[in-house]
Amino acid sequence: MSEIPYLAIVGGGIAGPALALSLKKHHGISSTVYELQPKHDVRGVNITLAPNAVRVLQHVGVYDTVRTQGYSYEDLHMSNARSQALGTLLQGSPKHYNFSSLRVHRAIVQKALLDELKAQGIPVVFGKKLVQLREDKEFVELEFADGTKARASFVIGADGVHSRVRDAIMDTETSYSGFMGIIGMGVKRESLHKSAAQTPLPSFIFGGRGFVAVMPSDYKGTVVDFFSTMPYPARSRKEWDELASDKTKVQEILQQRFGDQWPKFICDITMEYNKEGLSLLPFFEVPPLERWTSIKRRVVLIGDSAHAFTPQGGQGAAMGLEDAETLSHTLAHPDFASDYMRLLAAWERHRSDRLRLVKDFTDLNGRLRTPDTAIVQWIKEMLIWGRFKWTGQLGNLQWLHGYNAEDIVRVF
Ligand SMILES: Cc1cc2nc3c(=O)[nH]c(=O)nc-3n(C[C@H](O)[C@H](O)[C@H](O)COP(=O)(O)OP(=O)(O)OC[C@H]3O[C@@H](n4cnc5c(N)ncnc54)[C@H](O)[C@@H]3O)c2cc1C
């Protein structure tokens, strides 16, 4: 590389720290991460990291730390509300993908990444809320809420679904996807009703009144979480906050769907779970963007800031991690300083092509989870059953789970 650019990364969630680590570890390139929270954020919920996500964590050196605090699994079981098996997806596989899937709390992943940044001497400036960007021919100026400014040759926006960096470079609005999720975490597996013995975990259960998943989430699989995603009418951000904090109402929503006509252990956990522990999350989406970079290409978006969609494909964090590693190899290209317009355009094309496929996969999952009439539900269950009969346990998802970010070098 003829000249090493100075990089500022806005957002210390998942994608931002992964980018900083990949740049440093693979290419010896330094960057600075600016994060609005005053310290590591412990909020969030359990997430699933499929092999394509876990592969990036391994490449940046945090996989072992994260793996030992989550639940690794290969088989994801699908059944209907009458406990009839519909199929089993090999969602992780050391044999086929080199990795299992991992169920783990988002805060554990973020902390492992931030700890590794510290160990690598990569600066993270907490309590820095970006409020404005000004892009020049040679540099970008960042302005923060505390009045301070910084300059960088390139700025990477990894500041999530409601991205300030994105607002600074284009006109676009996030919108409610029509779906929300409710999750309860920390249920002792041994406390589940004995009917759970018929349902191998982790499991996705599809019924006429919706969908519920039960997933182990600690290393030994002794603790489980349950979550449901569902269509729900739109409301203002303020009304969402009010609904999320009205735990009686949140529990009522669960009880209307899962109070009866489901395996007894599902009725029990959704009915008896301590309502204060329930989290309700509306899913906001970023509309497909024409570009993920500013016109002068000195500002680049990655992760949710570029393409947030619902988590119904379990691929949100995975896409941010893939963006991060692929972008690090792009920024480190030997011709980057002289040819960054072309290289970033090639990266953007490669990533947005993949994101379109992953979004389609996610939307299909969302449709399968939506409540329906008995006949439509029966057809959906037959489709799930038929798909696994036809494709086998891999579910024709090698394109998704087998992706290796290192292969980006082939597109240049
Ligand atoms: C309920 C739920 C379940 C999910 N389940 C899964 C799953 O199973 N599998 C999966 O792969 N994904 C899942 N996801 C999605 C996943 O959590 C996100 O896609 C992922 O966290 C996005 O990472 P990111 O780094 O792009 O953004 P974030 O993790 O949102 O990080 C953005 C960071 O930027 C900071 N920031 C924001 N604004 C500014 C500013 N102005 N200045 C400085 N810093 C700023 C924020 O504080 C934050 O730390 C789920 C999401 C939800 C809501």
Image (tube, rainbow, N blue to C red):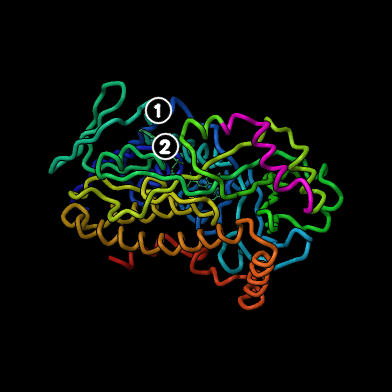
Is disc 1 surrounded by few (<14), some (14 to 19) or many (20+) residues within 10 Å?
Answer: some
Q: Secondary structure at mark 2?
A: loop
Q: Which of the two residues, 88 or 104, is positioned nearer the viewer here? A: 88
Q: Secondary structure at mark 1?
A: strand
Residue 38 percent coordinates (x, y): 44, 25
In the image, is residue 252 part of the stretch drawn in magenta? yes
Q: For the residue with label 1, is its CB less than 8 Å from the closest atom of ligand 1?
A: no
Q: Which of the two residues, 167 or 125, is positioned nearer the viewer here? A: 167
* Label 2 sits on residue: 12
User: Looking at the picture, which amino acid does disc 1 mark?
Assistant: Phe
Q: Quadrant of the C terminus?
A: bottom left
Res 103 label: none
Q: 241 left or right of 224?
A: left
Q: 285 left or right of 205?
A: left
Region of the chain picked out in magenta, as a range: 243-262
Res 126 label: 1
Say if mark 1 contacts mark 2, CB within 8 Å. yes
